[in-house]
Amino acid sequence: MDLKEIQNLIKFVAKSGASEVKLEMGDVKITIRTGSGKGETTIIQQPSQVSVPVPVPAETPAPAPAQPAQEIAAEEPKGDDTSKYIEIKSPIIGTLYRKPSPDKPPFVKVGDTIAAGDTVCIIEAMKLFNEVESEVSGKIVKVLVEDSSPVEFDQPLFLIDPS
């Protein structure tokens, strides 16, 4: 395998989005790893176990972040319809649980009417379980986070219709 074939293989792997590819041809073994960080690197291993770092073209990682941004932009117009609703947001970073325990029903579900001070979920942070209470009264319109999923600070969890 010559240098041009290896470079073409590197470009192909970078465009495909794969994080690691291993190729064995007779006594030649090639491993290509791409990763995020200061620079994308490729490691080529020969039978003598010599590793040669080769930079991956910088132009290939750019399209990957652009695609999720387009998806988010497509969802933003839908958010205009929810402007009349009040969001219950996460007060901390942690794991959200919609039920007090796995065998119990969820605290709230879509269509439930809640009062200010009602517990709507629990967020676990560093083995501490923190109850999240509603600050407003109203009807649950939408649950924005799935059970047992990680949440960030100030992330919307529920939409409430206060009317």
Image: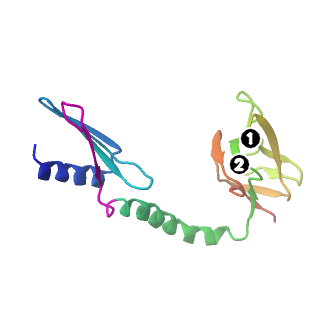
| Relative horizontal placement of residue 13, taking residue 91 as reference (left or right) | left
The structure residue drawn at horizontal position 36% and vertical position 63%, both measured from the top left corner, is 63
The residue where tag 1 is placed is: 125
Q: Main secondary structure of the magenta part?
A: loop
Which residue is outermost to the top?
A: 103
| Relative horizontal placement of residue 102, taking residue 41 as reference (left or right) | right
Q: Position of residue 122 (x, y in %)?
A: 77, 41
Tell me which label, 1 or 2, sits earlier in the chain. 2
What kind of residue is marked 1? Ala
Name above or below for residue 93 compared with residue 161.
above
The structure residue drawn at horizontal position 79% and vertical position 36%, both measured from the top left corner, is 128
The residue where tag 2 is placed is: 93
Q: Position of residue 56 (x, y in %)?
A: 30, 55
Range of magenta residues: 45-60
What kind of residue is marked 2? Ile
Q: Residues within 10 Å of mark 1 (few under 14, many from 20)?
A: some
